[in-house]
Amino acid sequence: KQWYQRRVRGMSAPGPYHSEQSRRTPGRRPNVKSSGGPPSAPPGPNIGPMPHHPVHRQTHKPKPKKKASDLVISQQLRELVPETQAYMDLLSFERKLDATIMRKRLDIQEVLKKPMKTKRKLRIFITNTSYTNQSKSPGDQLNSEECQTTWELKIEGRLLDENGQVRADPRAPKKKFSSFFKSLIIELDKEMYGPDSNFVEWHRNPQTQETDGFQVKRPGDKPVKCTINLQLDYQPQNFKLDPRLGRLLGIHTATRPVIVTALWQYIKTNKLQDSIHRDTIKCDEYLQAIFDCQTMKFSDIPFKLNPLFQQPPDPIVIEHVVAVDPGETKSVTHWDISVEVDDTLKQQMNSFLLSTVAQQ
């Protein structure tokens, strides 16, 4: 405190609180009794607050990564210690491994940009149940309304595994039955239910909630013929080709890239590319009948294919008869159709990319 006072007043002499003994004996602190409270300020001019000196904290900078040249052992040291050659071989193998992993990562990224689909079998179960309403009490007589027979139709589906069994694949996410279709239309016998109630329709829209099945209930005590139309929801979109081009390429329904690739393969196989002007195609008799031209440019192929795409593709049509028998009965039939689902290999590729990024 006294040193602080001398520093403020610019005095070099000892302060008034020093005793003679403290002045004569440097290095010893005077014996000052504490009164229990803070000492009173000595008389003199008013002293301002102590100036604030900023505190500079030392931050530890991260150590720079070692360069590849820092890991290489000099030639002189390798001559002195022959065992260091094994270390140099390990560095060379590590560089080759890093280059291979980077190349595979780039290949996987290119593959993931394309839709990866695989064919699976979807088994559609069509169940119809008929029952007759009964009175609440055994002694009551049944009128015409209480004796009315009602049938119920259910349409459900399950994916089959590789062995043709209805078992869920733990690797693949569970998909609802309606997620495979864009629309479903059930057409009942028009003579029995009239033109107003013989159609049951479902169409996908952005607010559609997926469901595991569809159910229709109608009154009736006679067998009912019904037609079930299922329009598959292709992702990416599929197109039905013109019959002439479809027969030429051997394709009925496919995506746009698949159709363009098949047409290019037909051009290469039959050597229809001009030898001088490589961007020109000389149409043979079959292509002339389809595109109505003798030559065409490569850039014109997408525009010439657009009129030949017929959409939507043909729906899946199932003819079914709802059996209505006296009493409560239940019948089940099933149909197998081919659908496209996401390949499980895509999830493994994504996991590989995430793991390699985390290791860097």
Image (cartoon, rainbow, N blue to C red):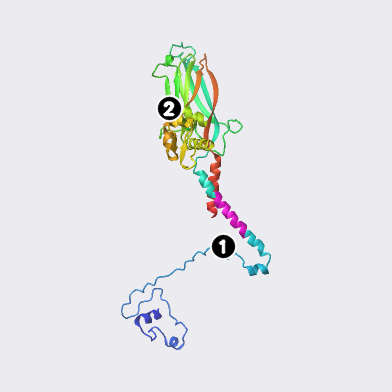
Q: Foreground mark, 1 or 2?
A: 1
Is 339 one of the magenta-colored residues? no
The residue wearing badge 1 is: 68
Q: Nearer the viewer, residue 174 or 247?
A: 247
On-image quarter of the C terminus: bottom right
x and y percentages locating residue 33 in the rendered image: 43, 79
Give the side of residue 234 with respect to residue 39, left or right: right
Compared to 33, does 123 lie above or below? above
The residue wearing badge 2 is: 202
Residue at the (44%, 87%) spot, across then down: 21
Is 94 one of the magenta-colored residues? yes
State the extent of the magenta-drawn residues as a range.
Answer: 91-104
* Residue type, label 2: Trp
Mark 1 and mark 2 lie on one chain; the one further toward the N terminus is 1
Specify few, some or many for label 2: CA neighbours under 10 Å numbering under 14, 14-19, or 20 or more.
Answer: some
Residue 98 visible? The answer is: yes
Q: CA distance from mark 1 to mark 2?
A: 64 Å
Q: Which mark is residue 229?
A: none
Q: Nearer the viewer, residue 167 or 65?
A: 65
* Residue type, label 1: Ala
